[in-house]
Image (cartoon, rainbow, N blue to C red):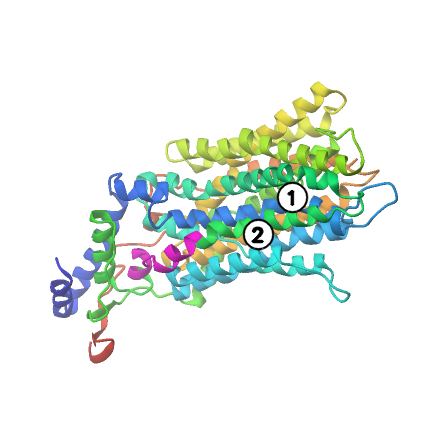
Amino acid sequence: MDREAASDASIALKGADAHYALDERRRAALAEVDNATFSWFHVKVCLSLQTIHFAGVGFFTDAYDIFAINIAATMIGYVYGHQTPGKTAKLNTNQDLGVKVATPVGTLVGQLLFGWLADVLGRKRMYGVELMIIIVGTFAQALSAGNHAVSIVGVLVVWRFLASGDYPLSATISSEFASTRIRGRMMTAVFAAQGWGNFAAVLVSFIVTVAYKNKILADPDVNHLNHVDYMWRIVIGLGCVPGVVALYFRLTIPETPRFTMDIERNIVQASDDINGVLTTGRFTHDPDAVVQRADAPSRLMGRLHRLLWQMAERQNPFGDCLFVIAFYGLGLNSSIILQAIGFGTPLSSGTRGVYDNLHNVTIGNLILSVAGLIPGYWVSFLFIDSWGRKPIQLLGFTMLTLLFIIMGTYPLTASTAGKNAFVFLYCLTNFFQNFGPNTTTFVIPGEIFPTRYRSTGHGISAASGKLGAIVAQVGFSRMVNIGGTNKFVPHILEILAFFMLTGIFSTLLLPETKQQSLEELSNENQEGFVRGPTTQIEVKDGIVVGRRV
């Protein structure tokens, strides 16, 4: 049916016939999305040739910025940190904590705000705005400078706070476009960009370190490492490049059909959009078309308490918070942990020692990323729609509990073999974080909420995770040096084991969401969801020329 015929048909709908026709059309359109066979459109979604890939770019940029600071903080410390006679400079505990915890704090606020705005104003409208903020915040960090009133660390903290995260919109958009059979894989493919962002941050750090080797060694002494100042700015600043590339596509993507149908309540437009996606992969929009709003449940803030109850009952953000304590506690401090076990500790001193330390830390982080983080995402991709979300999360928490107990209990750093064994176990923890709760706690909240509250619900869930990240970073920074520099690391790992154990029990409370449509998971009756048409607005050349009831 072409758009003109669809508009004429919508005008003719009245009374009980209108109610039945619109309700049937809505359910038929949703079924068309849910039951769509795997097509070139889905390939383009997953392989980044079309709209949803640019959901993944936001994750790539966000992850790059978050994990680049892991190595950049060491570089910043060499240039602007406290200097002890005979030793290289480094950031003090509060400075290191500030630059690492600023992003989780800003992301927590951003997830709540943008999650809510996306349900009010639309996914499309907020999608580009969110990425622009990330780009500006990332680039501004590379230009940061201090003065007598504000130190450079203070400036970095402000800009890292403003570079908020990308979780709610990426999860919502990918879930609302996906068919039921492959929804888990599509969402996981988007989320896996986080692993590539982590890898890119470490790889760029390694390349920059090697490129500046001769310049570092040529610096006059260890207290005047001028060239390291260039290095950390390049590492952080390059994080905005993929975001700039993707910005045009984010600003020009269409609205999701489910938002158009259930929040804008324009069923005719949404059904046409769905037909266009599954046939040509393109959307069309006629500004002069007659708009008919369906009489369907609206998004009322008075129902927010039901959303929060549903979250507590079916998504369990407590488990998300517990897991993220481990994920960010390790992810933001892997360089400290590698140094604590003596992995790759430089034998030299002076400027040569600075280069060797940066070189060894980047190599260690590359190993952790390639051997653990990235494979974990893609093994989840293979099994998430067959095994289900709940078994994968349960397996992840169980394995992490055992691994943290082993790593925290036995003195694996006593010999070279012990150090290598520790790194191997560390890689396994990265693997089971992603073939486990890191992936599932992204997927599940993107599925279980009604369309009218989906982005808000995911934003609250993601924010609870970032609360865990804040707790992890503050706790790590305060405890790591108890008894001496990095001496408390084994006990931190034991504490993380306890958190993972509680995550096992919280997972048992979760529902399984595989192979169910988003409408089934919303717990809302879809029969009679649309009660009939409301006001019809006729628009000509962008001007309202008539209304009908």
Q: What segment is highlighted magenta in the picture?
A: 245-261
- At label 2, the amino acid type is Gly
- Image quarter for residue 332? top right
> Which sits in the foreground, 12 or 509?
12
- At label 1, the amino acid type is Asn
| Disc 2 to disc 1: CB gap under 8 Å | no
Disc sitting over residue 237 in the figure = 2
The x, y position of residue 252, in whole percent, is 34, 59
Residue 457 vs 300, above or below: the answer is above
Q: Secondary structure at mark 1?
A: helix
Which label lies toward us, 2 or 1? 2
The x, y position of residue 420, in whole percent, is 67, 23
The x, y position of residue 183, in whole percent, is 35, 42
| The residue positioned farthest toward the bottom in the image shown | 545
Q: Quadrant of the C terminus?
A: bottom left
Q: CA distance from mark 2 to mark 1?
A: 15 Å
